Amino acid sequence: MTRKPEGPLRRGWTTGACATAATRAAYTALLTGQFPDPVTITLPKGERPAFALAREEQGPGYALAGIVKDAGDDPDVTHGALVLAKVSEGPAGSGVTFRAGEGVGTVTKPGLPIPVGEPAINPVPREMMRAAVAEIAAEQDASQESATGDVAIEISVAGGADLAAKTWNPRLGIVGGLSILGTTGVVVPYSCAAWIHSIQRGIDVARATGLSHVAGCTGSTSERAVQSRYGLPDEAMLDMGDFAGGLLKYLRRHPLPRLTLGGGFGKMSKLAMGHLDLHSGRSQVDFDWLADALEELGAAPASIEAARTANTANQVLQLASDAGLPLADRVAAGARKTALGVLAGETSVEVLVFDRAGALVGRAPH
């Protein structure tokens, strides 16, 4: 995860807000021949940001506008991407229809808020675009044939297929590009909302496709180890990262039969201590807790004292390994207890602890 910069952070705009602004500009140009620049839209909570146009194009029966996404100070993969909306006249009575242009994905698996076969444009951005079209149509002379609001909106993102490879979309069954996202239109820097949203959608897809076993891992090493151990499909791998609480709380409300949690010794020790956010900036390894666990396992006084003053969790793991003590099993059991406490018994839980090389060093239950 990118380190959060110091000082006040600048907010940004979602792909859904950018797509709405581009749609408003394009539809205005389709009706009037003129692109508003900057173009102002209304967000779901009433805020009215203005966007500068990066591209304008008109042709027979269509107009196209582009907005460069500004994610503010958030490390968003789509920051700087060109979001394009091509608005074309539609058949009378067709209303607003949506198409996936280049770089925007198509839904291929159930469980998402958009039906299979539809462009991956989420419900709130769709509503924002429909509202913008209706508002513009109402403002125009009713005698204008093209001011009916019957339009096809094709959303594209330049380079979106390559950007999508850096997101969860392939696992969620969104093929060909990015999703057009956003519930408020605003990107709050380092809110981690997008990551947690992806975890939730991953659980939804797993439930809808009938999976009985999913895994949440803290990083790529543990994920590879767990997936290889059980032969799980990609869609069963929930990219938990540091957000154990986000995964467990959503599973409590939307349970699945079986969950494997995998992670390194340090991250899993924090979960064992009751922390649900495993990021180093929001929770710390308690070396006294690890030392006390070693003492309970019968470690020598020198090892116990060395654990209390260790610099890293892996140093403590090495102390336990050298002494032949199952400290990683103790950590796995504690992490499992924390997880079961959140899940309230709806899901069976296994915890696997790995070393930095991906070797299994601890497990609960055995």
Image (cartoon, grey):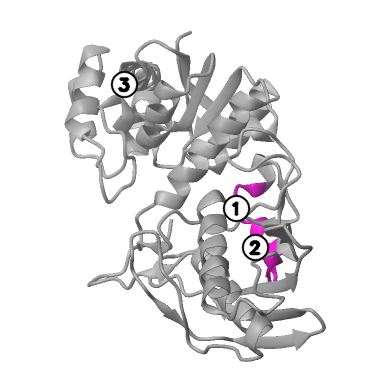
Q: Which residue is mark 2?
A: 163
Q: CA distance from mark 3 to mark 2?
A: 35 Å
Task: Look at the picture and state if 288 lies above or below 148.
Answer: above
Residue 278 location, x and y as percent?
34, 40
Mark 1 or 3, closer to the camera: 1
Q: CA distance from mark 1 to mark 3?
A: 29 Å
**Element type at marker 2?**
helix
The part of the image, by quadrant, that contains residue 42 is bottom left
Q: Nearer the viewer, residue 80 or 281?
A: 80
Q: Which residue is mark 1?
A: 167
Q: Earlier in the sequence, mark 3 or mark 2?
A: 2
- The amino acid beneath tag 2 is Leu
**Element type at marker 3?**
helix
**Residue 318 visible to an observer of this rendering:** no
User: Quick check: 206 left or right of 93?
Assistant: left
Q: Which residue is mark 3?
A: 338
The part of the image, by quadrant, that contains residue 140 is bottom right
Residue at point 59%, 88% (across, down) = 35
**Which residues fall within the magenta stretch?**
152-169
